[in-house]
Image (cartoon, coloured by chain):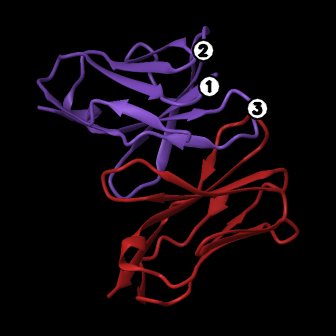
Chain colours: A red, B purple
Amino acid sequence: QKEVEQDPGPLSVPEGAIVSLNCTYSNSAFQYFMWYRQYSRKGPELLMYTYSSGNKEDGRFTAQVDKSSKYISLFIRDSQPSDSATYLCAMSLYGNKLVFGAGTILRVKS
Amino acid sequence: GAVVSQHPSRVICKSGTSVKIECRSLDFQATTMFWYRQFPKQSLMLMATSNEGSKATYEQGVEKDKFLINHASLTLSTLTVTSAHPEDSSFYICSARLSSGGGQPQHFGDGTRLSIL
């Protein structure tokens, strides 16, 4: 079993839809949780960064962490074609390396 | 803020050539930088962790004599692929973490696409 599980998709939605992306993990010691967006032939771009459980909102993006269920989510409201990319979840312990999910390919159709 | 610049973005060279890739944190100091390799349609694979002023820590299976890492300052780390061969062709990405603590997220460069003929 992988340490972090993420459905690779692809996930295809119409423009304006609410997108839900998820990851589950097995190591209950993880403290820091991140979502990155990666466009083709580019490096990952940090979207959201949270510590421990709870919600965090930034514009159209909301990140949720449920440590009791070992489950994290990223919601994208009013999705746009420019949101089409690969979304990577990542998590870590303090000072440790990142553990990535496989990445979910998102396609937003206009 | 938290911009990481990686250069060059694309390299095409002959087999046997050594290639140097630079990673710079432009607006912050980074005690720790990381080097990743990414194959098509796959997630990032950590190659090594680079700490300023000390030797890099390599992940299992990564040849340290093949992939030389230098982190001489708080804003610059370099990866040199020595005597590159076609199997070294890949997308190499660096990241940097703010010096303020190990709980800070990593910020990534835009990657270097290396093609060895």
Label 1 to label 2: alpha-carbon separation: 6 Å
Q: Which amino acid does label 2 sit on?
A: Glu
**Chain under disc 2:** B
Q: Are marks 1 and 2 in contact (CB under 8 Å)?
A: yes
Q: What residue type is labelled 3?
A: Gly
Is A50 or A87 nearer to us in this picture? A50
Same chain? Circles 1 and 3: yes
| SS state under label 2 | loop
State whether residue B115 is above or below residue A70. Answer: above
- Left or right: A53 in relation to A45: right
| SS state under label 3 | loop
- Left or right: A26 in relation to B89: right
| SS state under label 1 | strand
State whether residue A93 is above or below residue B64. Answer: below
* Residue under label 3: B101
* Residue under label 1: B32
Q: Which amino acid does label 1 sit on?
A: Thr
Residue A1 in view of the camera: no
Q: Where is residue A35 in the image (x, y as percent from the top left)?
A: 60, 59
* Residue under label 2: B52
Residue B5 in view of the camera: yes
Q: Are marks 1 and 3 in contact (CB under 8 Å)?
A: no
**Chain under disc 1:** B
Same chain? Circles 1 and 2: yes
